[in-house]
Amino acid sequence: MRKCFSKAGFVKEGYLRNAWENEDGTVTDNIVYGAIKEDWVLGNPTSIKIDDVPF
């Protein structure tokens, strides 16, 4: 699914830890993708820095 989003011009914009509770009570992470219309029209997705803070 992530490969499909990337080929369609979507960019990974976030990673949410412990964001989704399943029916069995377990908790999983969530990945957020987005696409800006201008990027789609120009065919040049804008990349973002997700890990920009050094630890």
Image (cartoon, rainbow, N blue to C red):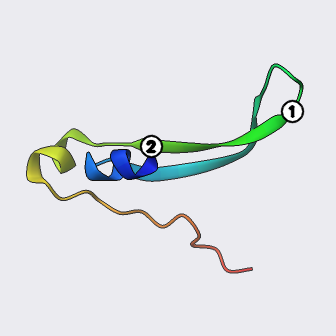
- Position of the C terminus by quadrant: bottom right
Looking at numbered disc 1 in the image, what kind of residue is underneath it? Thr
Query: Looking at the image, is 10 positioned above or below residue 51?
Result: above
- At 20% from the left and 39% from the top, the residue drawn is 37
What percent of the width, then of the height, locates residue 41? 10, 45
The residue identified by callout 2 is: 1
Q: Which residue of the protein is positioned furthest toward the bottom in this rendering?
A: 54
- Measure the C-alpha gap from mark 2 to mark 1: 22 Å
- Position of the N terminus by quadrant: top left
Q: Quadrant of residue 46?
A: bottom left
The residue identified by callout 1 is: 26
Q: Which residue of the protein is positioned furthest toward the top in this rendering?
A: 23
Query: Looking at the image, is 51 positioned above or below residue 40?
Result: below
**Within-10-Å neighbours for mark 2: few <14, some 14–19, many 20+:** few
Query: Looking at the image, is 8 positioned above or below residue 24?
Result: below
What percent of the width, then of the height, locates residue 29? 71, 44
Looking at numbered disc 2 in the image, what kind of residue is underneath it? Met
**Within-10-Å neighbours for mark 1: few <14, some 14–19, many 20+:** few
**Disc 1 on helix, strand or loop?**
loop
What percent of the width, then of the height, locates residue 32? 52, 43
Q: Which mark is residue 46?
A: none
What percent of the width, then of the height, locates residue 27? 82, 36
- At 18% from the left and 59% from the top, the residue drawn is 44
